[in-house]
Amino acid sequence: MEDVVQADLAPLVRLADGTVKQVNPFSGTQVWTVPGRADRPIAQPVADPQPLRAEDHGRWCAFCERRYLETTPERSRVVRVGEHWDTVAGLTADRVFDSVADFRLIPNLFEIVTYNYWVDNHGYRPTDAARARLAAYRSSRAGREHLLRLKAIKLAATGLSDKEIAAIPESERLDRSISFFAGSHDVVVARRHFVDGAPDTSGLASAGTLTPDEHEQYLRLMVASMRGLYEANPHAAYVQAFQNWLRPAGASFDHLHKQLVAIDELGQGMVQQLSRLDADPGLFQRWGPGYAAEEGLVIARTPSAVAYAGVGHRFPSVEVWCTGFGRPWELGATQLRDLSDLVHAMHAATGPDVPCNEEWHHQPPGVSQPIPTRAVIKWRVSTPAGFEGGTKIYVNTIDPWTIRERTVRRLRELQREGRVAPGVSIAR
Ligand SMILES: [Zn+2]
């Protein structure tokens, strides 16, 4: 046990042969980086790209802009109007094609934690607003047809035949569509599937290909969703926000989106952080951005946020921290923009061909200890195997200093091309 204790005191140790041993100061995750494996290319370009035809535009997948009715009834959308951004909430099925959404907030059709989970285990009751939205939505023919179509997909997934579904009275199927308005798993979908003018399917539009202004709206809608889920569901202890980019990172669509899932526990990750925080109230000040600066891991800064190469992650990771405290929806507009600019810059520097997860950490409403809002972007460039499963020591192919160098180098190129926000200051 003595070694573990020593490792806890020094999250980052480079041994004589070049091996880097890391222990995550917040989760305790143990990672070794073995020398000689860092220079492998990490991008996984789209294999066998297909040419895009004019008729593919807006129709490539169910998240694309001409297929709005294949997703659940939209909670809200953000639309650029000239120089500003409008938020439109609760469009009905008849109105959903009236504008093209730059970002949409929709419930997940196949939730990780279902509406029925909350009802059956917690006695969850939909809010009056959710009931009113269902009533408005089903009052039009297009709305009823949309709900019945979605409900049929859901019922078929439980094993019911078309005949069995048709045997359920239509009014009952519509009543049960309340799950589309009162669920606790949201999706934030960006407009583009491919970058403007992409000649073929290799031109996927990733978070880093958004403009900094667009990315800010994307992040704001994520924060609005997080707040909305906590407000609508009093049994939600934590809302996990995340983005899976590309299939190796767990994405079922290669159309840019984020997800937010409410759960009725804090989850092991948060529980561990809280117990470490109880033992050491200065945990985040000591081992967060300050430690990264001491170790030479800082990649870039904005006035109220910092990005650095993370220590002790199963996959090579960059972290973006808000340097102040506050729950995401308590942050000021400038703080959110600062955070967004860095998250955007990290994705731009990572590149659209690298599968990655973006995982958010924040202080939930029921926790009084301040926890910094931050995102961890993990490059999914290796697959943990039996060694990791047995030892719980993860072999990571790129050490934090190399992650930093690689990211800083690319960021400088992007800055010269004007592709990162002007407020981003890259570390020397
Ligand atoms: Zn799409």
Image: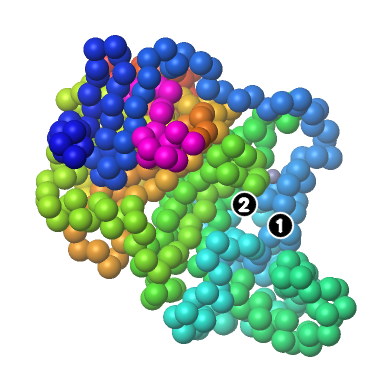
* Up-down relation of residue 156 to residue 214 (above or below): below
Q: Quadrant of ligand 1?
A: top right
Q: Which residues are magenta?
A: 386-401
Q: Secondary structure at mark 2?
A: loop
Report the residue at 42% width, 40% height from top. Answer: 390
The residue that disc 2 covers is 101
Rendered image quadrant of residue 58 = top right
Q: CA distance from mark 2 to mark 1?
A: 10 Å
- Residue type indicated by callout 1: Tyr
Could you say which is closer to the camera, residue 96 or residue 2? Answer: 2
Q: Secondary structure at mark 1?
A: helix
Query: Residue 381's spot in the image, x, y percent?
Result: 51, 29
Could you say which is closer to the camera, residue 391 or residue 282? Answer: 391
First along the sequence among labels 2 and 1: 1
Could you say which is closer to the camera, residue 303 or residue 258? Answer: 258
The residue that disc 1 covers is 68
- Residue type indicated by callout 2: Ala
Report the residue at 52% width, 66% height from top. Answer: 113
Classify 10 Å Cα crowding around label 2: few (below 14), some (14-19), many (20 and above).
many
Q: Is residue 391 magenta?
A: yes
Query: Residue 96's spot in the image, x, y percent?
Result: 69, 62
Extreme-right residue of the structure: 163
* Up-down relation of residue 141 to residue 284 (above or below): below
Residue 19 visible, this angle: yes
Classify 10 Å Cα crowding around label 1: few (below 14), some (14-19), many (20 and above).
many
Query: Residue 376's spot in the image, x, y percent?
Result: 38, 40
